[in-house]
Amino acid sequence: KSHVYSYHHKYIMSSETPTYSSQSNHTCVVLFYKYFLDEYSFLSSLISSSSSSCSPIIHMKEFLRTTCTKLQMKGRILLSVEGINGTISAKNQDIINSFIDQMKDYEIEISEEEKEEDSKRCLSSSSPSSCSLNIFQDIDWKFSNIKQDFTQECQEPFPDLKIVIAKEIVSTGNSVSVDDISQYGGKHITPKEFHHAIKEGWGIGDDNDEKEKHHKKSDKNRCNNDDYHVANKEINGSNNKKQKGKELVVIDVRNTFEYNIGHFLNPEAFEANNSKHVAMNPEMVTFSSFNDTFCVKNSNYLRDKKVLMYCTGGIRCEKASVMLRKQGIEDVYQLKGGIHKYLEEYPDGFFKGKNFVFDQRVALEPESSTMNDEKKSNKWIVGKCIECKEPYDEISGSRLCTVCRDLVLVCNRCRHEVREFHCNRHVMWKKCYFTFLEIFYEQELSDQLKELQSIYEKSTGQKNTRKTLSKQITKVKSRIDALKKSEVQVERDAPRRCRTCRETEPICDGLCWGFWKTSKPPHTSIEGENERQNSLSSIIPKLSIQLGSIVEPGHDWNEYRLGKKSSFKRGKVVDIKSWCSGGEKDDSISVVWEHDSFSEKGGDPLIYRWGVLDKTRKRRYDVQLAA
């Protein structure tokens, strides 16, 4: 049976709709997500009975793209049958409010025939013969402003708009379904409930309560006192003899690099270098490993504990709580709105350090209301350099573990003294695992090989670890063989290479991947506007390019980063933009490749360098005009 449905958007542009100047920078960011808990089975049935071009997910994507483009918004949105997850920026709050209004008004209208078959999924009736599904109602919205110094230096947090249809909005390898969230999800608690649960569970005095007068909590979001006391009794077990006296455990369900620069802790314990009252770090590189690397291994320890968990905005906790509860851990609570909402209410609370955000701003500090800048910067640097262990919390896309490419904290001094870095998980490989082998003599490589083989033999039952080691062993053997045959030579003074794209340091500074690639380029660091302009005037002008031009992989195409040339035939230029915010304008292009070139990307535009200046001030072109 085919389903009969249509899409409606009630929002009408009027004289009150915000107008937008193409010259102003983005000043506001909105984070949002929603799991389609009530709508999931209905959406699934529509999708299974629809052609791919008529899928409701495709319609949602086109609606989002049209709306965001009209409002000149940029950012990243993941869309799936299980929900939506996005972070987007705009030029002002009025535009964001307009976007939210249009989201709320988007609806799927179902015919009377469909209504009778699945009436429980119809959320509101618009006429006697149909009902509508307002799928984007009840989204969790979170807002932040972009500081003026950032807009002046780097312009905007996102280079463009990208909307992707995915299997999951938070990847678990399909191990957690939407139905699991409804059945096993933890209890959502407000920032106020979370704050007081930590205070009581960790036995922290009332001194911090003096800071609550500084909270910027609006009346609209203020927790009702009666509701709070009821909820707080439940969390702290005063109305349940079985729960009373349970030890509190706080778990950070973000990745390790996020945890390293900021997490919940007892300030007194931190100052005393006591790890007792500090949030647990599951030591994840990706969230999909949370169940196997943490939940299974710690289930016995956590089973009789009271668990509070948190993440950046709340979305990862929805699935993390399911994983814990499936292991038999019953007392699971999750922070509603995540760190973002907590810091709005408790800027001087128990979260210390920086909150990582997945855009050009990188990490945000709490807007402390009681500390001056000097005291704050000296006291709450919770991160440490992976090499020298000195306080340090500046994350950079150029500083990656050479084994797993996880972000690591490396101070500027150690950055120049150490060629390759190793995260805490791979620190034991520090003397034997290197990506770039050209600087080593044969005997040094033989020593590495011996150590790698020893680690391999001890890593029984660790499939992924053994696979990684096996590849490195083969690589080292090949290098030794090439040296013996004089096919290659040792280069003790070889330039440092980027771990991501493998280019030498004069060409790439390591900021060539993810949102890092829109960072300010080195040549713009020249002091003085006149000096910078004089420097740029001596550089060869960019080649001309136009919208609609047909391109193909060019001389500077890097297969490590962009994929094999043979996979890309011809593409069409659909936009001309700035690769480096704060640098030259119009030095990159968006290209949509023909379906036979990159069909798995579904025709989404990809960004390529078009005349970007490297550190040697040579222009780089990933693509060229097709012959």
Image: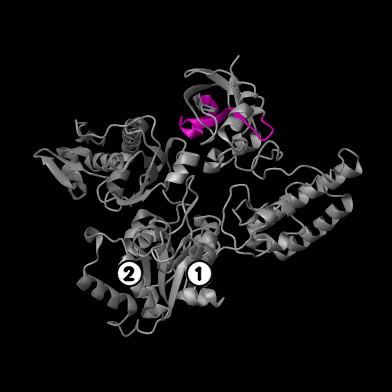
Q: Residue at x 50, y 69 (%)?
A: 280
Which residue in the rendered view is the most extreme toward the left? 128
Quarter holding the C terminus is top right
Considering only vertical position in the picture, is 448 above or below 535? below
Circle 1 residue: 280
Looking at the image, residue 486 sits to the left or right of residue 615; the answer is right
Identify the mark nearer the N-term, 1 or 2: 2
Secondary element at image label 1: loop
Whether the magenta-drawn stretch holds residue 582 is answered as no
Q: Residues within 10 Å of mark 2 (few under 14, many from 20)?
A: some
Could you tell me how far apart the alpha carbons at marks 1 and 2 are, in whole angstroms? 25 Å
Tell me where residue 607 appears, x and y as whole percent. Answer: 52, 31
Stretch in magenta: 596-617
Secondary element at image label 2: helix
Quarter holding the N terminus is top left
Whether the magenta-drawn stretch holds residue 599 is answered as yes
Q: Residue at x 54, y 70 (%)?
A: 297
Nearest the eye: 555 or 346: 346
Considering only vertical position in the picture, is 490 above or below 433? above
Residue 118 shows in the view: yes
Q: Residue at x 79, y 61 (%)?
A: 451
Which residue in the rendered view is the most extreme toward the right? 485
Tell me where residue 31 appears, x and y as whole percent. Answer: 37, 49
Q: Residue at x 34, y 74 (%)?
A: 209
Q: How is the image coloured?
A: one colour
Circle 2 residue: 212
Tell me where residue 134 appears, x and y as whole percent. Answer: 23, 44
Residue 304 shows in the view: no
Amino acid type indicated by mark 2 = Glu
